[in-house]
Amino acid sequence: MAAEKWMVKNKKADFKEIGRRFGVSEVLARLLVNRDIKEPDQIETYLHPDRTMLYSPFLMKDVERACQILMAKIDAGARIRIIGDYDVDGVVSVYVLYTALTRLKAAVDYRIPDRITDGYGINRSMIDQAYGDRVDTILTCDNGIAASDQIEHAKQLGMTVIVTDHHDIPYEETKQGKQYRIPDAGAVINPKQQDCGYPFKGLCGAAVAFKLVTALFAMAGIEDQADEYIPYVAIATVCDVMDLTDENRVLVSLGLKELQKTKNPGLSMLIAENGLVPEQLGAYHLGFVLGPCLNATGRLETADRGVELLLADDPDTAAKLAAELKELNDKRKSMTKDGVEEALEIVEEELSKDMVLVVYLPDCHESLAGIVAGRIREASGKPAIVLTDSGGILKGSARSIEAYNIYEELVKCRDLLLKFGGHPLAAGMSLVKENLEEFRRRLNENCRLTKEDIIPKVSIDIVMPLGYVTEELIQELTLLEPFGRGNPKPLFAERGLILRRACAIGKTTRFLKFRVENAYGRIMDALYFGNADELDRAIADRFGSEELAKLYQGRENTVRMSVTYYPSVNEYNGTRRLQIVIQNIMLE
């Protein structure tokens, strides 16, 4: 089993008083405090998110200016073109802006860059094409903040450009410190601008687009109609892995409730195609089932298909598109598996001493580089960059860890890169092949990570014996949903479990089901969805093959383990049984 560092949170507060005041258990009060939610207004907002907790869009820099420009263009009948991005956030952003401007009677169309031929974001050729199509105004979404040169070209052609984006602001390191470069557009809407007073900086691109639409609708006297976009923004927020805190938590909470009863034909058919029950949709299904289907179209074909699915207004068209997207995602999963296996082999054989893993996979589809990089990071605990060959140019994606700001490290290597951009934890870049080894060398020479930094940290909320697990507690834990980055599922721990028996479950992948007993005699089922073969080997190494055999035979054995877990209820044939889902295991 891979080494892990288990740490129990030990934040202090008057849990009894919090529980009394808000009508929750001390366990839930402790979980709130562990998330730094301590003040009464914070707790109220967290436990009961509603529409009134969303901030006014007019607090965001340039929103009012953008509205004035767009309203004037609409009145003049000027042609407006939306230019988005090929991931879920970009697809949803385009959908939100396109349908909203159409409702306002704008002469509007959209274009999404091709991942292979165009690359990320607005480029010169797309601007020239817009000029040839007599487009007057370009409106970007989920891109544009790093396109100063391209936007200057559009201005020279006489076009107006409005930028809506959420990515980090590009900067250069100078003797005076960081010098940020903001495009000289008609309006730039990005809450991460230093002089933007918007109180929450963590919105995704679709949420920024939603803020602009909310302001536009307010000016048009139809502000209440903007709320219908919240479910789509929820999808983009989860799929772009934004922190589910503050306003994002409100958007996703509200959006999930509406998605469970969506009337959008495309989404309804995509939900059905994946065998999901609408009333049971959660953040997990957005991020790991529906989102990847929308993403697959931009990875392997054109992201326009994702927008077409959301725009589909009849069941037959929606069903056809949903089936195509599901098929594409299945193909993407197979290709990803092959890429991950090849990448891990290279890491083990050639790069094991590197702290920053730069893996060159010439035959990997470039759209899968980010997914493969993420899997390498998960397996190694190290920042990972996967580069693929694209017509003689290397294009890649990075996935990093909390201790390593990949965007800032790429800034230090900008002389080796043709193009780059992103966040502290994820980024994209391109470079000539001749710079590959120097790029790898410099990242590793500049790296200040220690072995301690790359040991996975397991942050435990509460050491809680199984006797505390009740249906009432499990129901109460739903108050903390939706779970995701920034608002993780609570993690409990129990020491010294006795294993009464084990059996393999799962049709295509081998998982484990245990019958466990704690020191106080509480017996419960436990599921483990980790690597069953690896766990078997670890048990055999630690306790002996004979004890492993006894465990599977349901005989008394010496195997003992401490676990982290999340409680749940297993309902089968009308019978409900408490169980735990094991997340991490430490053999004793």
Image (tube, helix red, strand yellow):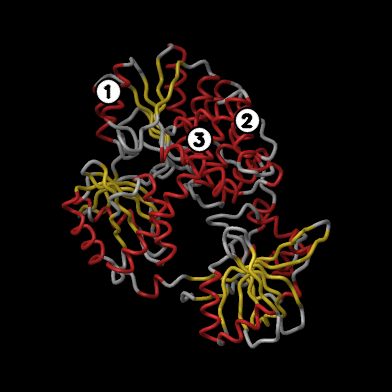
| 163 vs 319, nearest the viewer | 319
Determine whether 299 is above or below 18 in the image: above
Disc 3 crowd, CA 10 A, few/some/many (<14, 14-19, 20+): many
Asked if residue 431 lies left or right of residue 110, the reply is left
Question: Mark 1 touching mark 3, by CB under 8 A?
Answer: no
Tell me how far mark 2 sits from mark 1, CA to CA.
35 Å
Q: Which residue is mark 2?
A: 264
| 506 vs 267, nearest the viewer | 506
Q: Which residue is mark 3?
A: 92
Asked if residue 563 lies left or right of residue 524, the reply is left
Q: Quadrant of the C terminus?
A: bottom right
Mark closest to the chain's N terminus, 2 or 1: 1
Q: Secondary structure at mark 3?
A: helix
Mark closest to the chain's N terminus, 3 or 2: 3
Q: Residue at x 66, y 47 (%)?
A: 49
Tell me how far mark 3 sits from mark 2, CA to CA.
13 Å
Asked which quadrant contains residue 514, the reply is: bottom right
Q: Which residue is mark 1?
A: 128
